Image: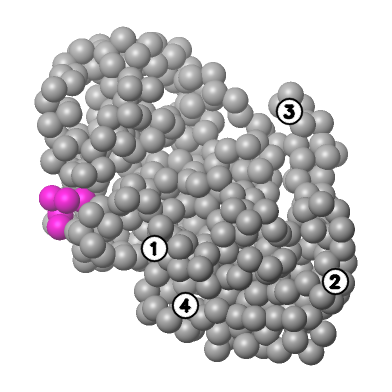
């Protein structure tokens, strides 16, 4: 038996001693994905236990959290269901047209939710889910997410991505105790949100690729079973994109199940490696740069999907290039910290200090560190090239999959940034976090600048 052989409902309660040497565990109380799934909410409430093991009772207050859009889609329906089932229930509707998870909206929800609330129900997707996750975590109470759009992979994670003081970061939180994905609701989401969900899933081809490269080059922990689970689920969604276009319920179930599964996989290994490589780092930098401009930018899955298209093209071009290891070593020796620091301040502005902290920990461009990685790449060249070839074979259809729902597949469509700004993003995304991924790999081999020129010419000229 392997993880890939288990059903989703088995995976959410698994206790598994894996051949990777680690024990994988997950404990989500309730999960329902499919047609009419929201109707299981009352049963879930009747069975719900609090953090201390005591049951939720009809005297315990429930709090529905929505925004002006999700209230109309499902929030009011959920509120009435809870009310008719005999629970004391209140609600809060965020009145804003646009929101991101930041300290302003975290504080807004914390003030709106009274201290006697025992179970918040988030009705929405990314931002509503993360805000409710954070506030419930701070209160030490469980929460549910009733998804209204299959737009992101954070339904089952135990961290919350947020922008705090302009810096994109992951805040400690907890996983939802109940997850509901009703395909009757999910299929009514705008095409842009569905395309974002596809982008966030297809990104896993790059994420697993980068994880495997780091395992080979750096000896980083890697779980073959978790990687297989991710790739199998991603393949399933890729094969059902036409069904998403036609509104097929099963296709939306596959999409939602995969989005939930990504969070489960991250929980198994206690980090986001199964779902996040260079494409996610690029997405985070796009979001950081938007925040520096005072703008909201695009949906996370939109940014990540576009970045997946770009990273695939970079890997594809890389496979046509000869590797010159001596040239790579000379390039590594040319690193000048002072010049680099000046560029970081220019590109990241007030967020530059966070980038310097990453470097203090990782020394990712230190010549000796880079040359050691070059030695490992040269030693394992054929294995690495085999990994990349398989990734490109699967991921090269990313523009087709994302484009099927009219999603973004080119950086030129990201109107917030000029060609010159996107060039900076390609060059310096690798500095955003201490995680080895594709852009650092290209830098190590001294071909990053050449690949950036190729991408800029392909998409802008």
Q: Does residue 270 appear to the left or right of 25 in the view shown?
A: left
Q: Position of residue 240 (x, y in %)?
A: 61, 67
Circle nearer the viewer, 2 or 4: 2
Badge 1 marks a residue whose secondary structure is helix
Identify the mark nearer the N-term, 2 or 3: 3
Q: Quadrant of residue 269?
A: top right
Over which residues does the magenta segment extend? Answer: 418-422
Task: Report x, y in % for residue 431.
Answer: 31, 34
Residue 57: which disc? 2
User: Can you see residue 118?
Assistant: yes
Position above or below: 254 against 43: above
Q: Between marks 2 and 1, how big is the CA–CA gap?
A: 32 Å
Q: Indicate yes or no whether the magenta region holds residue 421.
A: yes
Q: Distance of mark 2 from mark 3, alpha carbons?
A: 37 Å
Q: Which mark is residue 94?
A: 4
Q: Are marks 3 and 1 in contact (CB under 8 Å)?
A: no
Residue corresponding to mark 1: 104
Which residue does the image show at 28% across and 16% down from the upper left?
366
Q: Given this view, does label 3 or label 1 mark the residue nearer the observer?
A: 1
Q: Answer with left or right where residue 14 lies relative to residue 459.
A: right
User: Going from the N terminus, do you reach mark 3 or mark 1 first?
Assistant: 3
State the residue lying farthest toward the front. 115
Q: CA distance from mark 3 to mark 4?
A: 41 Å
**Relative to 129, is 265 above or below?**
above
Residue 22, numbered label: 3
Q: Are marks 2 and 4 in contact (CB under 8 Å)?
A: no
The way the protein has been coloured in the rendering is one colour
User: In this rendering, would 66 be left or right of 458?
Assistant: right
């Amino acid at each position: 038996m392997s993880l890939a052989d288990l059903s989703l409902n088995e995976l959410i309660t698994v206790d598994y001693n894996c051949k990777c040497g680690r024990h994988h565990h997950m404990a989500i109380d309730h999960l329902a994905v499919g047609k009419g799934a929201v109707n299981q909410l009352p049963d879930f409430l009747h069975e719900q236990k609090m953090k201390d093991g005591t049951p939720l009772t009809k005297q315990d207050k429930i709090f529905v959290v929505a925004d002006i859009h999700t209230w109309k889609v499902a929030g009011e329906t959920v509120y009435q269901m809870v009310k008719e089932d005999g629970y004391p229930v209140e609600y809060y509707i965020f009145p804003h047209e646009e929101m991101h998870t930041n300290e302003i909206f975290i504080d807004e929800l914390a003030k709106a939710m009274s201290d006697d609330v025992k179970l918040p129900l988030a009705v929405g997707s990314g931002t509503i889910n993360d805000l409710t996750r954070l506030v419930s975590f701070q209160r030490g109470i469980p929460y549910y997410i009733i998804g209204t759009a299959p737009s992101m992979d954070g339904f089952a994670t135990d961290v919350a991505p947020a922008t705090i003081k302009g810096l994109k970061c992951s805040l400690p939180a907890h996983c939802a105790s109940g997850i509901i994905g009703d395909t009757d609701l999910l299929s009514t989401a705008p095409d842009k949100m569905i395309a974002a969900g596809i982008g966030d899933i297809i990104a896993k081809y790059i994420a697993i690729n980068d994880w495997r490269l780091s395992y080979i080059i750096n000896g980083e922990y890697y779980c073959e079973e978790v990687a297989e689970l991710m790739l199998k689920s991603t393949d399933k969604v890729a094969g059902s994109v036409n069904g998403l276009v036609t509104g097929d319920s099963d296709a939306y179930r596959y999409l939602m199940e995969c989005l939930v599964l990504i969070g489960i996989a991250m929980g198994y290994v206690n980090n986001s490696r199964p779902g996040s490589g260079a494409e996610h780092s690029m997405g985070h930098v796009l979001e950081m740069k938007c925040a520096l401009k005072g703008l909201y930018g695009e949906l996370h899955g939109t940014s990540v999907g576009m970045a997946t298209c770009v990273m695939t093209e970079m890997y594809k071009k890389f496979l046509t290039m000869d590797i010159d290891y001596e040239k790579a070593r000379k390039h590594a020796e040319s690193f000048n910290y002072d010049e680099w620091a000046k560029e970081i301040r220019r590109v990241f502005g007030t967020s530059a200090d966070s980038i310097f902290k990453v470097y203090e920990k990782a020394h990712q461009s230190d010549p000796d560190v880079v040359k050691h990685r070059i030695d490992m790449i040269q030693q394992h060249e054929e294995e690495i090239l085999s990994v990349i070839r398989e990734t490109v074979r699967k991921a090269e259809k990313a523009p087709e999959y994302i484009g099927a729902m009219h999603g973004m597949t080119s950086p030129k469509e990201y109107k917030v940034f000029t060609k010159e700004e996107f060039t900076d993003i390609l060059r310096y995304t690798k500095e955003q976090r201490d995680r080895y991924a594709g852009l650092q790999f290209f830098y190590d081999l001294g071909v990053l600048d050449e690949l950036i020129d190729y991408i800029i010419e392909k998409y802008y000229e």
